[in-house]
Image: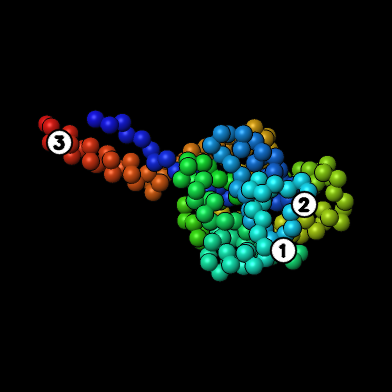
Amino acid sequence: MKILTKDKKGVLIVISAFGGAGKGTIIKELIKDEHTILSVSATSRVPRPDDEEGVTYFFKTREEFENMIRGNELLEWVEFCGNYYGTPRSYIEDKLLANENVILELEEVGAIKVKEMYKDAVLIFILPPNMNELISRLKKRGENDEYISKRLKKSIDEAELIKHYEYVVVNDILEDTVEDIKKIIYVAKSKVAKNQKLIDDIKEELKNVTTII
């Protein structure tokens, strides 16, 4: 009798946050796990001296990127300052099939687009403990009052989109935040929809046991 195992496919995790909530630091901790990676985006911008193909970005010409858009090869994309940026669908699928949990660091509009195209994606929004702490963190980053004011006004619009997310995690103590997100990933991997092969195998095993009895 064979040993039953869960489907070996990773989880697509989309993480968004208010500026200053600590998203980048959280992601750095999460990808220390050998089965969790940060997605690599494609871009039409010209590589810089310290860029590395397939690590910093997948670099494309503007024509190549537009062909990807037309071919529906991107989970999401934006044009910013004259350059395209987007998430290649094939890269994500390959990593998920290799049992890698893939993190996308996206703003809210991009996150919602991903969820529309990839129903299994897990959307997590990171919140600060309170607004005073958020302002304090922005100041520690060296941001001036004008930037902080603009950032907070932008957060008002962002807050309206949190309803599209499945989870919110308050980033008060970093270690606790990282553990909370790891638990969410574990729960996502345990959902019935992600374990259909396991269920089918159990049903087959039950038939065989019934036959033996």
Dot in front, 2 or 3: 2
Q: Position of residue 119 (x, y in %)?
A: 47, 56
Label 2: how many residues lie within 10 Å, few (<14), some (14-19) or many (20+)? few
Residue underneath mark 1: 83
**In percent of the image, x 61 and y 38: which residue is there?**
31
Measure the C-alpha gap from mark 1 to mark 3.
62 Å
Give the mark nearest the N terminus, 1 or 3: 1
| Quarter of image, res 197 | top left
Q: In this orientation, does residue 21 appear?
A: yes
Q: Position of residue 175 (x, y in %)?
A: 64, 32
Residue underneath mark 3: 210
Residue underneath mark 2: 48
Q: Secondary structure at mark 1?
A: strand
Measure the C-alpha gap from mark 2 to mark 3.
64 Å
Q: Position of residue 125 (x, y in %)?
A: 61, 49
> What amino acid is labelled 2 in the image?
Arg
Label 3: how many residues lie within 10 Å, few (<14), some (14-19) or many (20+)? few
The answer to the question of whether label 2 and label 3 lie on touching residues, with beta carbons closer than 8 A, is no
Q: Is residue 188 above or below residue 33?
A: below
Q: Secondary structure at mark 3?
A: helix
